[in-house]
Image (tube, grey):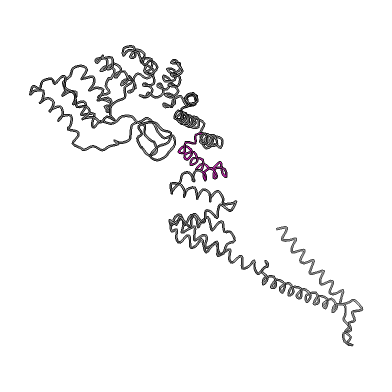
Amino acid sequence: MLWSLLKILFFVAIVAAAAYGGLWLMEAEGGVRIVVAQTEFTLGALESAIALLVLLVALWLILKLASLLVATLRFINGDETALSRHFDRNRSRKGLTELTAALNALAAGEGRAAMVEARKAAKHLDRPELANLITAQAAEAAGDDRTAQEIYRKLVEDDRTRFVGVRGLMKQKLAAGDTDTALQLAKRAFALKPRHEETQDLLLRLQAGAHDWSGARKTLAAKLKHGTLPRDVHKRRDAVLALSQAKDVVDEGNDIKAREAAIEANRLSPDLIPAAVMAARGYIAQGKGRNAARILMKAWAVQPHPDLAAAFAEIEPDESPEARVKRFQTLVKAKPEHRESKLLLAELYIAAEDFPAARRALGDLVETDPDVRVLTTMAAIERGEGASDAVVQGWLAKAVTAPRGPQWVCGNCNAIHAEWAPVCESCGAFDTLAWTRPPEQAVAVPAGTSMLPLVLAGGAAARSDAGREGADDAETPEAETVDSRDEPERAT
């Protein structure tokens, strides 16, 4: 309000000053005499002031006309002028409209239309990198890999878009199956943006697939440094990489270095079963049975596993079955109710020919958790106790359709592996294998197989009633009934 009042007062003061000046000029004596071509003009004070004002306006118009002429000449010459800036603004508006249309088409999945609009925008905008970015994405959406590759190469040449170009080329090489070139591009992309999480994960997976364990451990350390990986997960995966490195060293024949790498892997992650097994066997080779037993018992307390039991048996390879049963009590006491502990003791008692104790050790697994290993162990107990062929074959027939039990299963694609590996052989994911039950049966079986126990048992009973001689000494058809892959691994 005050500022508006001040402006009004200022305007009134200027008008008053101009009126006062005009009155003063009218009353002033004297004037200006101008002679032009023998013609004399005499101007009074007021007339002189008006003539001076007209002269100044005329001079200003002449200067403006001269400036317009110079601007026109510069425009014709290609220099930037107000006129050229006007046309530039029109082109920019048109280019932004076409760029918006390209983005809308790309979001709608219309790759071809997006490419057309992006090309139009490139002609009107002085920002080729923007049009190239959209053109590359649109070409990929339209399935035009050649155009996308050409655009990505242009993006690599620009510092502002180099990472996007390298990343685009890397994905194209991956899609084409050229993992070697993709690995080199991933390293370059990682050098440009070490904090980019997707690039970190992809580089780690490619390095693991190429068995570049040292490089993978550096990438893993970078993930921890930049905060894209929790410390506990880093410790576990670093142990996986150290174990993988140890396996490669074993293949090279350097046993000492392999033992050191395996022990380091077990130190980083004591619950990693393959690392515990390899470290224990390294200590066994050095004659350090107590160290091996300590590692295996610590891993068993976290997750019991048949491989741990097999390594524990290697500590004393020449002991009697009875002594082995006694020694293994120290291993299973950490988790006596676990199914693996019960199965292990049952198998040990079978080896010691103490079949009643084996039945007691097996407990209620036949009713609560009947898989292939449990049912075949029960068949062995029945055979050891002198049961008929009908009973034994009935248990074996049940094993045909029973679940396979825990296995190494990829948590990413559910692929089943016979042995642990750092990288899934099916999907290439890193550190996704876990000892667990598969979500479904790996092999579908006909519906009629549910009748096999009754059919086999009935056939065996009929043969027994017919008085076949030597039935007790006959060889049981285990090999014909149960696939060899379903036989349980024994600790002895």
Decide if residue 268 is on the left or right side of residue 451.
Answer: right
Q: Residue 194 location in percent, x, y?
A: 56, 41
Quadrant in the picture for the N terminus: bottom right
Q: In which quarter of the image is residue 457?
A: top left
Q: Residue 322 location in percent, x, y?
A: 31, 12
| 1 or 86: nearer the viewer | 86
Quadrant in the picture for the C terminus: top left
The residue sitting at 78% across, 75% down in the picture is 57
- Residue pushed farthest bottom? 38
How many numbered circles does the render carry? 0
| 215 or 302: nearer the viewer | 215
Q: Residue 20 location in percent, x, y?
A: 84, 71
Decide if residue 341 is on the left or right side of residue 243.
Answer: left
Q: In this view, does 425 lie above or below 110?
A: above
Q: Residue 83 location in percent, x, y?
A: 65, 69
- Residue pushed farthest right? 30
Decide if residue 279 is on the left or right side of residue 446.
Answer: right
Q: Is the magenta stretch mostly helix, strand or loop?
A: helix
In the image, is residue 280 part of the stretch drawn in magenta? no
Q: Is residue 243 above or below residue 93?
A: above
- Residue pushed farthest front? 253
In the image, is residue 198 part of the stretch drawn in magenta? yes
The residue sitting at 23% across, 31% down in the picture is 400
Q: What stretch is highlighted in magenta?
A: 184-213
